[in-house]
Amino acid sequence: MDFDSLTDFLGEKTSIALAGLLVGLLFGIFAQRSRFCMRSAVVEFWNRHGTAKLAIWLFAFSSALISTQTFISLGWLDVSQARQLSATGSLSGALLGGLLFGIGMILARGCSSRMLVLAANGNLRALLTGLIFAVTAQASLNGLLSPLRQWLAGLWTIAGGSTRDLLATLHLGHSGGIVFGLLWLAAAIHFARRSRLHHLEWLGGIGVGLMVALAWLLTYQFGSQSFEIVPVQSLSFTGPSADTLMLVLSPPGQPWDFDSGLVPGVVLGSFLAALWGRELKLEGFKDGHSMRRYIAGAICMGFGGMLAGGCAVGAGVSRAAVFALTAWISLIGMWLGAGLTNHLLDRPPRQNVRAMSASPLNGQSPAQP
């Protein structure tokens, strides 16, 4: 893939920012139309009620794994020098951060990417949650919470390189990664048929996963042909949300990068998809208790996401797609933390679960925030 003509015309910084905008725009459209949401998938899984949202998440997860590993196998993508694999990682940060993020997304009734999508549709709860999430993430990166994050992350670390690469550790190779992704794709198809999922939702979930692989590919291709350093990265919404907040608050003229276009792209894509589907609607908090719950969830997600090195998309899909050990630990932590919190706070009585399972709405997940 040759980007010389594009970068010569627009400049390298503008070109990579536009690439982020394009990927974010498509992600926002796919995520909005498919109702992609890790929190809903977790709730369905642990409550054993419905499989529609679980199927959508599995479509996104499996397609990200398959397409990313395929790009690597074809020689189009090299992630060996990406910091998610090459730099020293934190096992303690991955586990504790994943648990905290899972707790937070249940409290806030959605993960960080879902909040971004919903805010663009007029959901004021999601807007406030997203702002607090971004502030907490920035405070965890360079602010008041940074010393605590660094201390927790330093409790148990692992060297970068092959020790952090699950495929290398297990001697599976990239073909093994593709086969592993195909197994999850088969599970997604099974659950989609079981819940009678509409084919457009299938495509939306797959589209979300393809955007993860496309982001890896574009940043690598730009980086390999650029005179400036372009980090090889994929979709994540913890660091980029904090960076976008600081970009808005900083004087004009700040340098652009992939993340500069990503977050605005997701907002624009989700807005256009909701406009096309006539789903734009202003929504607020119903009482003070729910507001406190959302705020607590946003703080847990902001700190947990920065500690884990990524959010439900960043660590749970993007970095899992390159089989970074810490990402898989974070992903497990998110599912466990969310499952426990859902059980303690939101799980309906057993008789209600049985009644819902017997109803005609079986296979559909509870209402979204």
Image (spheres, grey):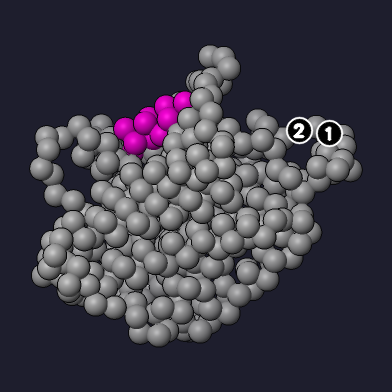
Front-most of residues 174 and 22: 22
Q: Secondary structure at mark 1?
A: helix
Which numbered disc covers residue 8? none
**Majority SS type along the magenta span:** helix
Q: Along the line of sight, which residue is nearer the eye, 205 or 48?
A: 205
In this picture, residue 111 sits left or right of residue 245:
right
Q: Amino acid at mark 1?
A: Asn
Q: Which residues are magenta?
A: 123-137
Q: CA distance from mark 2 to mark 1?
A: 6 Å
Type of amino acid under label 2: Pro
Classify residue 201 by image quadrant: bottom right
Identity of the residue drawn at 34% across and 80% down: 76
Q: Secondary structure at mark 2?
A: loop
Is residue 33 found left or right of 265 in the rendered image? Answer: right
Occupied quadrant, residue 61: bottom right
* Image vertical order of residue 123 relative to residue 13, above or below: above
Instruction: Name the mark on residue 352.
Output: 1
- Where is residue 132? Give x, y as percent: 38, 30
Q: Which residue is mark 2?
A: 348
At 29% from the left and 78% from the top, the residue drawn is 1
The answer to the question of whether label 2 and label 1 lie on touching residues, with beta carbons closer than 8 A, is yes
In the foreground, 166 or 49: 49
